[in-house]
């Protein structure tokens, strides 16, 4: 399902992206796996495209979400808006929040992970995986930093798991997935970074829950609901203890009120 919401001015729209949608496909004809789905399957967005014809598909994708990641995606309706927002993303002047279920119980209340990430140079992983500078096959690692706040501890399908709030302070490809793998708490359902072992969950449990962008054109602060609750039963999630609740947890991510455990190479 794709939900399109307008913001105050005629500058941006945000999309609540479903978790099984590619933004683009190398083959334009592969409509099920491309931005074409956003254009043709949502009447509200189609009406926007009829008014704004400055790009091939009528809008500008400002940032990306992985195929397996759901949540808030911002698009610009004109070149000026898109350029303004893109600069803020590039300068790391936005705030992005993700919610995830990860394997195991994280004992520290908050983690500040500072582990460089680069491309996985092994032939079998080319264009598929990233990796950390801990590995000899890591190509051109760049500084990468993530904050992780434990919201709840519990069980996923009877196995220890934690619900966490994640804030990427840099913007590397697969950053959250790589960092959680490196600390030993792989995201539930992450087939790629579980070394192809995590097959039973119906999806990868990573969701872009909130986005804050203060542009000159418009102040954007949008969020979606937590999809990883005990209902529906397909989530197979049972909470046994609560450490922090939303929305109060958002403010803690950029504060020093938490005793952050620093993790680096």
Image: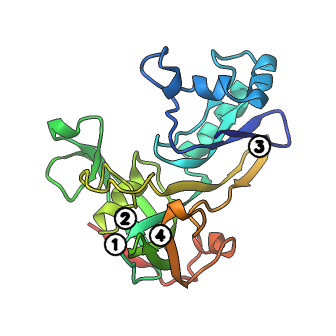
Q: Residue at x 31, y 56 (%)?
A: 198
Residue receiving disc 1? 263
Say if 69 sits above or below 223 in the image: above
Looking at the picture, how far across and down is residue 180, in whole percent? 36, 63
Left or right: residue 247 versus residue 200 is right
Residue receiving disc 2? 114
Q: CA distance from mark 3 to mark 1?
A: 35 Å
The reply to whether the C-beta atoms of the residues labelled 2 and 1 are less than 8 Å apart is yes
Among the two numbered marks 3 and 4 on one chain, the one whose residue lies closer to the N terminus: 4
Among the two numbered marks 4 and 2 on one chain, the one whose residue lies closer to the N terminus: 2
Q: Nearer the viewer, mark 3 or mark 4?
A: 4
Q: Nearer the viewer, mark 4 or mark 2?
A: 4
The reply to whether the C-beta atoms of the residues labelled 4 and 2 are less than 8 Å apart is no
Q: Nearer the viewer, mark 3 or mark 2?
A: 2
Among the two numbered marks 3 and 1 on one chain, the one whose residue lies closer to the N terminus: 3
Label 3: state its secondary structure. Answer: loop
**Res 113 quadrant in image:** bottom left
Say if 88 sits above or below 102 in the image: above
Q: Nearer the viewer, mark 3 or mark 1?
A: 1
Question: Is disc 2 surrounded by few (<14), some (14 to 19) or many (20+) residues within 10 Å?
Answer: some
Label 1: state its secondary structure. Answer: strand
Residue receiving disc 3? 216
**Res 156 quadrant in image:** bottom left
Report the disc number at residue 148. 4
Q: Residue at x 41, y 48 (%)?
A: 172
Q: CA distance from mark 4 to mark 2?
A: 11 Å
Say if 260 sits above or below 73 in the image: below
Label 2: state its secondary structure. Answer: strand
Looking at the picture, how far across and down is residue 105, in whole percent? 39, 79
């Amino acid at each position: 399902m794709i939900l399109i919401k307008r913001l105050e001015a005629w500058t941006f729209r945000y999309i609540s992206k479903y978790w099984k949608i590619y933004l683009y496909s190398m083959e334009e004809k592969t409509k099920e796996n491309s931005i074409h789905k956003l254009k043709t399957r949502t009447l509200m967005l189609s009406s926007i495209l009829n008014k704004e014809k400055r790009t091939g598909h009528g809008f500008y994708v400002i940032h990306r979400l992985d195929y397996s990641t759901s949540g808030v995606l911002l698009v610009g309706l004109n070149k000026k808006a898109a350029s303004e927002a893109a600069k803020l993303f590039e300068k790391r002047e936005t705030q992005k929040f993700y919610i995830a279920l990860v394997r195991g119980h994280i004992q520290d209340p908050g983690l500040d992970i500072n582990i460089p990430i680069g491309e996985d140079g092994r032939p079998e992983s080319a264009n598929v995986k990233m990796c950390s500078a801990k590995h000899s096959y890591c190509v051109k690692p760049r500084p990468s930093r993530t904050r992780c706040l434990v919201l709840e501890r519990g069980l996923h399908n009877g196995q220890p798991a934690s619900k966490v709030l994640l804030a990427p302070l840099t913007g590397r490809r697969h950053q959250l997935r790589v960092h959680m793998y490196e600390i030993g708490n792989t995201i539930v359902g992450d087939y790629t970074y579980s070394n192809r072992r995590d097959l039973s969950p119906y999806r990868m449990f990573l969701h872009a829950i909130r986005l804050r962008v203060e542009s000159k054109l418009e102040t954007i602060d949008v969020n979606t609901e937590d999809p990883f609750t005990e209902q529906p039963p397909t989530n197979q999630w049972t909470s046994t203890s609560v450490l922090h609740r939303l929305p109060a947890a958002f403010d803690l991510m950029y504060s020093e009120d938490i005793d952050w455990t620093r993790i680096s190479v």
